[in-house]
Image (spheres, coloured by chain):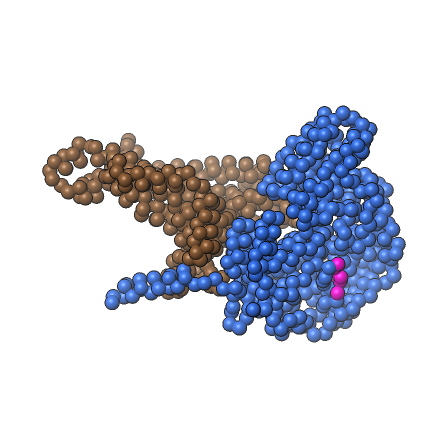
């Protein structure tokens, strides 16, 4: 198992370096002069050159790349021309918000998607199955931003049940950071009003974000469960008089979960980088918005920082799924070692 | 009841309270009435020497004071930190006498030395507003005569000098230098901290989320109203629909940047007012005068005469006025140029016949900002209008950085580029200089306009001290630029904000940027 983990980690490092090279190349071949944009529309040529020199943009690309790689080795992701902060500190500010949003959404998606998938499989071709099919098709078909706006209009504007957007109420001060995860920090500091306010603000964006993931998880879980319930060992278990609940919960679910887990891992990695529309609609100060704001300002260093972080997340999610595969299905582990 | 059950009950109770809490008309903090401004643009820095745009300047104007200030419509320059000033007849030496009672937020007096430090810092960093004065003012030209008198000795006469000073904010040098890191002149610290003497000070600064300012109770200048706001929360709301919803729900007191239709719609709703004023932001379609079919002046004139100007106003539901000169109406010395272009197909065909493409048969590229609906609609108008001259138009939406990059060189600048421009001062030089060779490469210089006579006139006008002599020069400049038709001179879009009707004291000044509001005179009067 250790050898398996080491090989996967080495591959992960190589992939990250590849990602770094590609991102750097793309960022620097697209049109746009970041120094001019940062200097402002009225800046003189000498002002633009001042910015260019300050940020090392006057150096040849090879030098810039070498400096960047050297910086990363030291944990320095560079500085943002737009925010004037280090990219590291910007990521620390925005990424925890996205992490909380995506994790919460995924928990809802898994918490609802897996049981609904099981129910749809067990009660196949009944009204339960048809109802879950409506949910799953809607989840795939409805664009997140539209759903977000509709939920916002109905639950926040018309009914006034939930806040329109943002991370916390205007007069609610965030807790002093410990983990930088707002809800966790508020819990750790015992600020219950902040916890409640944060949940109230998170509910709509999380529901909006979880919907497509919920649909996918439900569909995959249903299909796998139907396939598993047809297996001989399940028929055998039934013949032995084992209860349906025990068969599903104890024997079928573990096998049906292998592909579902892969789906969850992929979805989770994808969601960490695909939240920008939901973040925009709900003013959620997350990494997606940071990335887009940086991209429209041709601010290269944050774009590369975000890409690296999201690439790392995606790879880690897949890595963890691979490990979970090995745990759920020992044949995968053995195949990897061969 | 177990501890975990009690905890769960507490969480449920607070959550229920949070969910059920009605949205207040405005926020309160103790006895302070807090105004909530929902804006789409972040405030990445508040360092007065480093950067400005509308949201940054709104914060800077609130946290800092300058020697003088723009107020009113038409904009007037009024004394602020300087109670009076005088200049020599050649406009080379300017002396300012400071008020004696101005105090920075930490209690230090605002002195001539602080003014010297602030100007020198901006010139040294060579960023933000430095371009306004750097050709005329050097660090050694700033002299402290005594604690409350400062003198600026310019390297050559510069008549518009005073018109730029409202944007040169005065910092507390002692505070800034005490926060210096690695010789950065306090840049890192001033990104999110202030060392000013303005009517507000920073209370909260959550980058990318919200920025809270608190009114300075004993502001040295006093407050114009007893109901003045006790603080302002500038909240980032990035989506226009969410801004509108926040306003209607009472979660925001002021919003900016709604669509034309949204502004019209909310203006009819009870409890909402929409101030609506002609602005100084011009919209023009810049034509590349150095390359392609638009290099030919006759061709450009044909395009100018073919364009349906009324469509511009209709796109904004009537909330715009047509330009009558290359200069905005609020610019000092503006003249309505006789015979400014209006749609006239006969004339368009006449000029086309004189051009190198007498029968049309060419395709022009129209570049505009991706996602800007009004500019897209104008592209459709161009397609329709120029079809009549047998000219086809290819619409190319680009994101702003790519558009700026395209417009930075004559070889890459598109045939036509949609450009909004807001001059930073009311002095005509601020607009005239956009047509000077030194503006080539900037987004508003993307027509690469070239006319040696006009350039000479611009250079002469900016160094001529007396207005009586400058005014005719600018009248001539406007006429000559219009005659050369480097762009379709479009319109001046009205500036609008939507606000709750308990917000009082709003003062419009067209010289401020698009969404910018002077927060100082605002008051909240609860019904």
Q: Is residue B330 left or right of residue A146?
A: right
| Magenta residue span | B74-78
Q: Colour of chain B?
A: blue
Q: Residue at x 72, y 61 (%)?
A: B72
Q: Is residue B185 above or below residue A246?
A: below
**Residue B21 in view in this figure:** yes
Residue B6 image offset from top left, x and y in percent? 29, 66
Quadrant including the C terminus of chain A: top left
What x and y, as percent, mark residue B65? 68, 65
Q: Is residue A83 visible?
A: no
Question: Toward the viewer: A143 or A108?
Answer: A143
Is B13 contained in the magenta span?
A: no
Q: Residue furthest left?
A: A240
The residue at the point 51 percent across, 60 percent down is B251
The residue that appears at 55% across and 43% down in the rendered structure is A295
Q: Residue at x 12, y 36 (%)?
A: A239
Report the front residue among A296 and B271: B271
The chain letter of the brown chain reads: A
Image side of residue B117 versus residue A183, left or right: right
Residue B3 quadrant: bottom left
Work out which quarter of the rendered image holds the N terminus of chain A and state it.
top left
Q: Could you say where residue A79 lies in the image, as x and y percent from the top left?
A: 55, 49
Q: Is residue A114 left or right of residue A182?
A: left
**Does the magenta portion include B77?**
yes
């Amino acid at each position: 198992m250790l050898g398996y983990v080491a090989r996967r980690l080495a591959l992960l490092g190589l992939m990250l370096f590849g990602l770094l090279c590609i991102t750097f190349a793309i960022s620097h071949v697209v049109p746009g002069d970041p120094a001019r944009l940062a200097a402002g529309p009225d800046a003189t040529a000498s002002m633009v050159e001042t910015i260019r020199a300050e940020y090392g943009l006057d150096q040849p690309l090879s030098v810039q790349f070498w400096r960047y790689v050297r910086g990363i080795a030291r944990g320095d992701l560079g500085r943002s021309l737009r925010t004037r902060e280090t990219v590291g500190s910007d990521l620390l500010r925005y990424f925890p918000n996205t992490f909380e949003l995506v994790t919460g959404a995924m928990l809802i998606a898994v918490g609802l998607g897996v049981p609904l998938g099981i129910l749809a499989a067990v009660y196949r071709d009944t009204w339960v199955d048809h109802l879950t099919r409506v949910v799953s098709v809607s989840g795939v078909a409805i664009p997140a931003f539209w759903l977000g706006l509709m939920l916002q209009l109905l639950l926040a504007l018309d009914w006034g049940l939930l806040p329109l957007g943002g991370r916390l109420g205007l007069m609610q001060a965030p807790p002093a950071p410990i983990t930088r995860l707002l809800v966790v920090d508020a819990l750790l500091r015992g600020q219950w009003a902040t916890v409640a306010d944060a949940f109230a603000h998170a509910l709509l964006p999380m529901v909006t974000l979880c919907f497509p993931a919920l649909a996918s998880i439900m569909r995959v879980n249903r299909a796998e469960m139907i396939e598993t319930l047809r297996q001989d060992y399940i028929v055998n278990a039934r013949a032995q008089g084992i209860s349906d609940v025990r068969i599903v919960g104890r024997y079928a679910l573990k096998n049906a979960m292998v592909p579902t887990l892969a789906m969850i891992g992929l979805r989770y990695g994808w969601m960490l980088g695909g939240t920008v529309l939901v973040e925009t609609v709900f003013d959620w100060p997350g990494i997606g918005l940071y990335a887009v704001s940086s991209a429209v300002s041709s601010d290269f260093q944050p774009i590369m920082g975000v890409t690296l972080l999201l690439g790392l997340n995606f790879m880690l999610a897949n890595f963890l799924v691979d490990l979970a595969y090995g745990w759920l299905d020992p044949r995968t582990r053995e195949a990897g070692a061969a | 009841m177990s501890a975990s059950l009690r905890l769960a009950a507490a969480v449920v109770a607070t959550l229920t309270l949070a969910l059920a809490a009605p949205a207040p008309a405005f926020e309160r903090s103790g006895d302070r009435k807090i105004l909530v401004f929902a804006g789409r643009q972040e405030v990445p820095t508040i360092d007065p020497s480093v950067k400005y745009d509308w949201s940054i300047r709104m914060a800077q104007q609130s946290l800092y004071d300058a020697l003088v200030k723009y107020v009113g419509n038409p904009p007037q320059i009024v004394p602020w930190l300087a109670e009076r000033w005088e200049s020599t007849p050649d406009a080379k030496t300017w002396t300012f006498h400071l008020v004696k009672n101005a105090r920075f937020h930490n209690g230090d007096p605002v002195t001539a030395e602080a003014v010297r430090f602030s100007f020198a810092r901006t010139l040294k960093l060579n960023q933000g507003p430095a371009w306004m004065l750097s050709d005329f003012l050097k660090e050694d030209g700033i002299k402290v005569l005594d604690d409350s008198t400062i003198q600026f000795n310019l390297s050559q006469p510069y008549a518009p000098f005073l018109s730029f000073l409202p944007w040169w904010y005065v910092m507390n040098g002692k505070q800034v230098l005490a926060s210096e890191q690695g010789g950065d002149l306090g840049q890192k610290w001033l990104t999110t901290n202030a060392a000013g003497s303005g009517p507000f000070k920073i209370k909260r600064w959550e980058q990318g989320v919200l920025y809270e300012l608190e009114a300075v109770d004993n502001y040295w200048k006093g407050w114009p109203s007893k109901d003045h706001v006790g603080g302002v929360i500038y909240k980032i709301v990035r989506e226009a629909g969410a801004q509108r919803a926040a306003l209607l729900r009472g979660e925001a007191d002021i919003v900016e940047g709604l669509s034309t239709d949204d502004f019209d719609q909310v203006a009819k709703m009870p409890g909402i007012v929409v101030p609506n004023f002609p602005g100084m932001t011009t919209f023009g379609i810049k034509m590349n005068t150095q390359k392609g079919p638009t290099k030919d002046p006759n061709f450009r004139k044909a395009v100018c005469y073919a364009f349906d100007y009324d469509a511009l106003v209709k796109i904004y539901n009537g909330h715009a006025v047509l330009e009558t000169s290359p200069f905005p109406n609020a610019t000092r010395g503006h003249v309505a140029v006789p015979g400014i272009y209006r749609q006239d197909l006969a004339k368009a065909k006449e000029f086309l016949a004189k051009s190198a493409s007498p029968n049309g048969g060419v395709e022009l590229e129209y570049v505009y900002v991706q996602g800007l609906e009004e500019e897209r609609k104008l592209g459709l108008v161009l397609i329709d209008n120029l079809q009549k001259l047998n000219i086809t138009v290819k619409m190319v939406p680009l994101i702003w950085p790519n558009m700026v990059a395209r417009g930075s060189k004559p070889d890459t600048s598109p045939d036509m580029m949609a450009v909004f421009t807001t001059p930073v001062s009311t002095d005509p030089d601020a607009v005239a200089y956009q047509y000077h060779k030194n503006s080539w490469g900037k987004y508003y210089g993307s027509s690469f306009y070239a006319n040696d006579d006009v350039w000479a006139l611009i250079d002469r006008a900016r160094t001529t001290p007396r207005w009586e002599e400058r005014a005719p020069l600018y009248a001539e400049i406007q006429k000559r630029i219009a005659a050369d038709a480097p762009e379709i001179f479009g319109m001046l879009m009205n500036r609008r904000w939507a606000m709750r009707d308990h917000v009082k004291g709003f003062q419009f000044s067209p010289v401020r940027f698009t969404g910018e509001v002077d927060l100082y005179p605002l008051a909240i009067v609860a019904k």
